[in-house]
Image (cartoon, grey):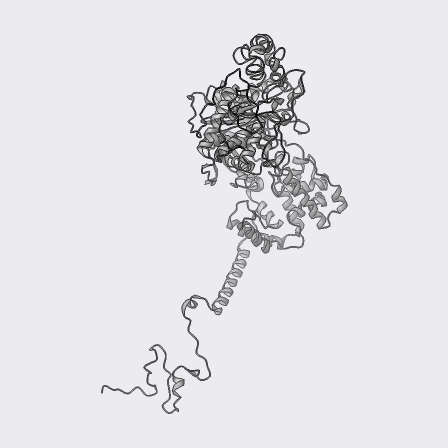
Amino acid sequence: MSDQSPPPGWTPRDPDTPPDVPQPRTDPSAPQQPQQAQLGGPQQGRPGKKARRRRTGWRRFLPTWRMVLGGILLLALLIGGALVAGYLLVDIPPANAAATAQSNVYLYSDGSQIARDGEVNRVNVPLSQIPRSVQEAVLAAEDRDFYSERAVDPKAMIRAAWNTATGKGTQSGSTITQQYVKNYYLGQEQTIKRKAKEFFIAIKLGREKSKNYILEGYLNTSYFGRNAYGIQAAAQAYYGKDVNKLTTAEGAYLATLLNSPSAFDVVSHPQSRPRALARWNYVLDGMVKKQWLTPAERATTQFPEPGKVRAAAGLSGQRGYLVEAIKDYIVDNKILDDKTLAEGGYRITTTIDKRRQTALVDAVDSQMVSKLEPETRKADRLVRAGGVSIDPATGKVLAMYGGIDYTKQYVNNATRHDYQVASTFKPFVFAAAVENDSRTQDGRRITPNTIYNGDNKRPVVGGRIRFAPENEGQISYGNITVNTATDLSVNAVYAQMAVDVGTGKVKKTAIDLGIPENTPNFVPGPAMALGTLQASVLDMTQAYATLADHGRRTPYTFVEKITKGGDTIVLPQRTPTQAISREAADTTTSMLVSVVDNGTGTAALAAGHPAAGKTGTGELDRSAWFAAYTPDLVTVISMMGQDPDTGTLESLYGALGEARIGGGGYPARIWAAYTKTALEGTDPLDFDLELQPGAAQPPPPTSPESEPPQETPGEPSPSTPERPTRPAPSNTTGGRNQGGQNNGGQNQGGQDNGGQNQGGQDNGGQDNGGQDNGGTTQGGDQGGTTQGTQGNTQGSAQGSDGGPAEGLRPPSAFLE
């Protein structure tokens, strides 16, 4: 009984066959197949059929072609269904609230209101009133195939998304139809939901409305900057005429603005002129390519200068400057784009401290504006001023002075990029030297006590190009320490130091401190040490704030909080970074303290707080700077010359009744008046400095009677020479303490060179060049010119921050 027979019709199981392999069922009456066929040969299972091979290893995880094909078909069905559903479900909505834009409210840090903007400026016009050339200029700028393409361009959208994702620039990929839908029916928010609605509404609109209807709507709803919505408002805002009187060139410029309304306004943002001109040329070239403009007409087309900004009455005084600077910050940092911000409805709490803002305005008014007499002194018409104050620990902009009145001087002097920063750049050269442990051409480490040759027009050694800079006043100083060269702002020393450090390293250090890399004229070379780049007052304040905070850079900000409705807008992270070593920053600060105590910046002592700073006077005296800081407040003040009618940069010769304007004069006095008020009620703080090795070591003394040894430029001096001196800013006092009695007018009448050592400590000072002639009577203006021997030639030649002697020679054109 143990050996049971299998059921009829089944073949016995082969003991070598795996149990999961099915056994073929056979008919007992059918002839038996050969054994080979039973064991998995080509006839296994069914005669004439190959058995399906089982997947093994990693192939088991790959989908089959049937699965791939099925997935593609399913995805196509889903997409098609979604498109159909979206088209059926999304209706063309009524015009959005942005078509009647709301106001934005700007607040001081304490919550009180600075200003309100955003009142709608729009006048709709029919397409028939818009010149054909203006229509074509807009199409050339935004959508050249508008009349032949569909309402949406999926390929362009995919291409734009890919370029954005791969870092090739943010692009919309939208047709004019889509942009019109966004402007008129939806909004500017960058969300998937809004983009999906825009897609379906554009398709429906393209099917239901004509191309002319869509183009007319687009031209009447687009934002052109200057609070102008629509082409008619833009024509009035930029050219003071109706749209039907616009020329082709003017239409092309308005079309240019559509790409970036705020950035391409060449009046309020003169630093953007090259980009705006490039875009304007792109528009005109596109018109030629589409045969809307002949090459001959294109060749004769000249850029049409837009008119002045006509600010709203509510933005008078400093309010307009603050609002525009805050807008620029929001847009530049991609918090909101300018079109989204223009929709309005935002409540923007700023970092501006109302008390300190008032103090800065009062300081400029009392120290400079109140002394201007434009009716009797033509040079006073040219005077402009800009200032920024930052908390170095937080990067918050606490106060800003943009100009006398936004409704009268529309360009913000605190943020413009068209004036040279002059010698306020020199501290960055020394900071780079310490940061990189740099040495002179003959191998000496660069410290405040390193000896350099400071002779006028001394050729720079080691550079790739010949450069022999002039010192201010054509003065030759001989061998002097870096500290003294900083006090006196000696060009020859710092040009050589820039080459010793490496101009590329100097530029990198300046960028690390906070100077934007794309600053105009930021070209590596020995001349950069003289401050030929054109950084803004705001940029320079950022860089000096990094020095003040021991080399730690905290990116500046104007904004504390932005809300709209119940939503809070995310602000960018501003994580502090150690830009340069504390040793490099603090050693630089120690020398700048000496500039205030002993050098060209002594006017800052009136603030009553320990300070570190640097003066600067631009080429042809077009600008005068004072950049300085206490341990907890950084402020940069600049005076600038500009023709109010033509906008051209002008020299400040004769302004405020002085032969020349220097950084140690009015800018330093404005700084002192502001800082004294801004820090009122706080105890003066000393700087806590960690210096590089050897920085605090005083130079070895020398005998006053001994003459400094003669040496080849660039070679070390066997001994430290007596400190040379130089003239300083002119004033009415004739001298720092005694009217020039001892020093020939120490500060204002020829600070050092007009008396103390060379111009007559013995002869040109107390007796002849000082009390009687170089001091009380003439020390303020001429620095002891009458009877001082060297005081006659040097003291009256005028330092960078003082006034020249009368009738000697015209002011020099080089930088201090």
Judged from this view, the residue extending furthest toward the right is 296
User: Would you say 577 lies left or right of 520 here?
Assistant: left
Relative to 145, is 334 above or below? above
Relative to 722, is 390 above or below? below
In this view, the residue in front, 484 or 312, is 484
The quadrant of the rendering that contains the N terminus is: bottom left
How far from the left and from the top, in percent, is residue 71?
48, 65
Report the number of numbered marks: 0
User: Would you say 237 lies left or right of 480 here?
Assistant: right
In this view, the residue in front, 508 or 130, is 508
Relative to 618, is 343 above or below? below
Give residue 231's quadrant in the image.
top right
The quadrant of the rendering that contains the C terminus is: top right
- Asked whether residue 402 appears in the rendered view, the answer is no
In this view, the residue in front, 227 or 277, is 277
How far from the left and from the top, in percent, is residue 137?
69, 45
Judged from this view, the residue extending furthest toward the left is 1
- Asked whether residue 809 appears in the rendered view, the answer is yes
How far from the left and from the top, in percent, is residue 63?
46, 67
How far from the left and from the top, in percent, is residue 434?
48, 32
Relative to 414, is 39 above or below? below
